Image (spheres, grey):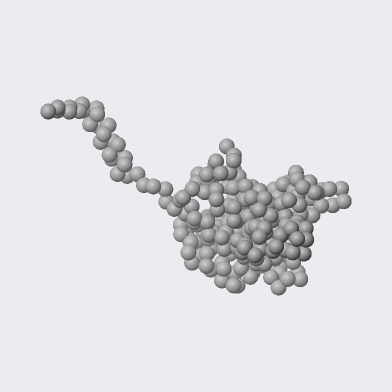
Amino acid sequence: MKIIQLTGYKLTLIGVVVLASAFWLPPSKVTVYLAGDSTMANKEAKAHPETGWGMPFIAFFDSTVRVDNKAKNGRSTSSFISEGLWKSITDSLQAGDYVLIQFGHNDEVASKSTFTSQPDFEKNLLRMVNETRAKGAIPVLITPVARRKFDASGIVKETHEDYAPIVRAVAASQNVPLIDLDKESIELLQNFGVEDSKMLFNYLSPGQNPNYPQGRTDDTHFSELGARKVAEIVLKDIRSLRLSLADRIVISNLGIK
């Protein structure tokens, strides 16, 4: 019968390992809520290939992250609040969660019932920021993603000249992390160019897709490729902002180092 002898050093080392394991806790789970409009929203099968950027976004995180996409087609800050969609987020918020807030497309169109004046748009964003922080969660403001619109010389035109600056100003005044998706998506469109940028949106010929038998020309809503490209911009900015959420991104899925 063998008697195993352990030196004092080995016993000490084993004790340290046991003690460390007793205090080690797995990473806490967090929820990332997406608050926004149709450019971010989940889509029904009948809308395919239209894709909100929040759809591919969920695939880039490890198992400690749950993405809850509350974005809805046609919503502005005002209608998102009045319909109770915002309350559905704040009622569930836990400390350490994130809320990614992207509005402007429907707020800025005066002919829509969802129109929000510039002062009210600012007030609504401030409310969202303050109510998120009140729960110990982290707000991230996102400027509205660009529409595909080129001038005669092939330069992308700014389509959110009044409302994107408000998002930037609120982020600066409240010290909120900002993802300037308006600016960065303009750069994306410019890099693709006038014709190739159509691949990022829903450009369908008649008969090409059964959901759109008459075809479709849409410079606002994304194709699967466009949604993926926009989601990648948001994810890269989460990393460049050094948010704690960045540690939970699965880098191999994103294709970046």
User: In which quadrant will I find the C terminus?
Assistant: top right
- Name the residue nearer the viewer: 120 or 93: 93
Q: Position of residue 22 (x, y in %)?
A: 30, 44
Counting the numbered discs, the total is 0
Can residue 122 be seen in the rendering of this structure?
Answer: no
Can residue 84 be seen in the rendering of this structure?
Answer: yes
Picture quarter containing residue 74? bottom right
Of all residues, the one furthest to the left in this rendering is: 1
Of all residues, the one furthest to the right in this rendering is: 152
- Name the residue nearer the viewer: 245 or 55: 55
In the image, what residue occupies the spot 56% across and 67% down?
86
Q: Position of residue 138 (x, y in %)?
A: 52, 55
Q: Position of residue 175 (x, y in %)?
A: 59, 52
Q: Position of residue 145 (x, y in %)?
A: 69, 55
In the image, what residue occupies the spot 48% across and 52% down?
65
Picture quarter containing residue 111? bottom right
User: In which quadrant will I find the N terminus?
Assistant: top left
In the image, what residue occupies the spot 61% across and 64% down?
44
- Name the residue nearer the viewer: 204 or 146: 204
